[in-house]
Image: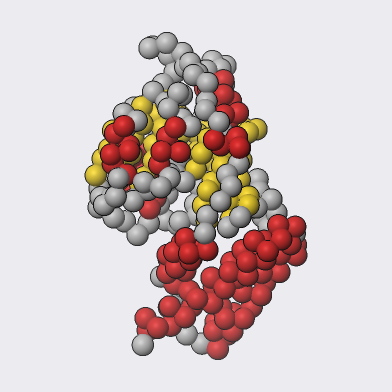
Amino acid sequence: MKYHPSSLRSVSPLKLRGDKGVILSVVLATRNEEANLTRCLEAVKSIANEIIIADEQSTDKTVGIAKKFGAKVISVPHQENFHITKNIAIDAARGDWILQLDADEVVSPELACEIVSTINHESSTMNGYWVNRRNWFLTRFLSKGGQYPDPTLRLYRRGKGRLPAKDVHEQAQIQGPTGRLRNDLYHYRDTSFAKYLDGFNRYSSFLAANINPEVNLRQTLNYLGCKPVVTFCKIYFRHRGYVDGYPGFVFALFSGLTHAIAYIKYWQRLL
């Protein structure tokens, strides 16, 4: 697999303000992330004053890798909604600003510089910042299908941002005004189809648990027919997922099938 060149360049040492100035906390939640964590932490080690990791009792080398980067590791039980674990890391941070990341994400050198410049700007009135994210799917970063710029709220003042922990695709809730950074966060989410199916299975199970408790012909046709077709057409045609070639087609197809699989799981639980 080929990675974006910018994500692999080392970041030149960056300086936050002095000991009494701005402090940046990088926070993550992890569970068996040895394949991703080094790349993620390498990209932020020069800008983070502290790294906080809430780890769901990983059985691989995740904790050892985290400690090599000087991270504070908090061992916690596994949660079906990973955002509960992320909030534990957020609550443990002591920096003026919090940068919340996933282990399979990489801060580009350009974004790292922009973060430092932004939080050092004394006249800033923003309490949080949206970041554009590029999502890798199978063989490439998706550029269409509603997958770019995929803005996500990841940088915020301590005490001003937190995850609601109600949905796997939710954004942090920020108290006060927010701005937007220009440079990209790279997300190496689905580097193989097998890995994608793991996430697909978890997300469809989450959806199944939130389906209205009824089984009738209208709901069945909606989940098994209407929702999959509408979702596919929206991603592939309206948002031009076809521009991304075969990966774009597969992404649109399985995004639609998520609804059908979720409904089948829901129906099976009722038997």
Locate residue 96, reporting x and y percent: 41, 24
Locate residue 47, reporting x and y percent: 46, 24
- Identify the residue shown where x is 31% and y is 29%: 70
Q: Position of 19 compared to 230: left or right?
A: left
Is residue 91 among the parts visible in the rendering? Answer: no
Task: Determine the image quadrant of residue 108.
Answer: top right
Query: Residue placed farthest to the front in the image?
Result: 1
- Identify the residue shown where x is 52% and y is 59%: 192
The total of numbered circles placed on residues is 0
Task: Determine the image quadrant of residue 86.
Answer: top left
Q: Say above or below: 144 vs 174.
A: below
- Identify the residue shown where x is 50% and y is 18%: 14
Q: Say above or below: 149 vs 181.
A: below
Locate residue 208, reporting x and y percent: 44, 72
Is residue 168 among the parts visible in the rendering? Answer: yes
Q: Say above or below: 264 vs 183.
A: below
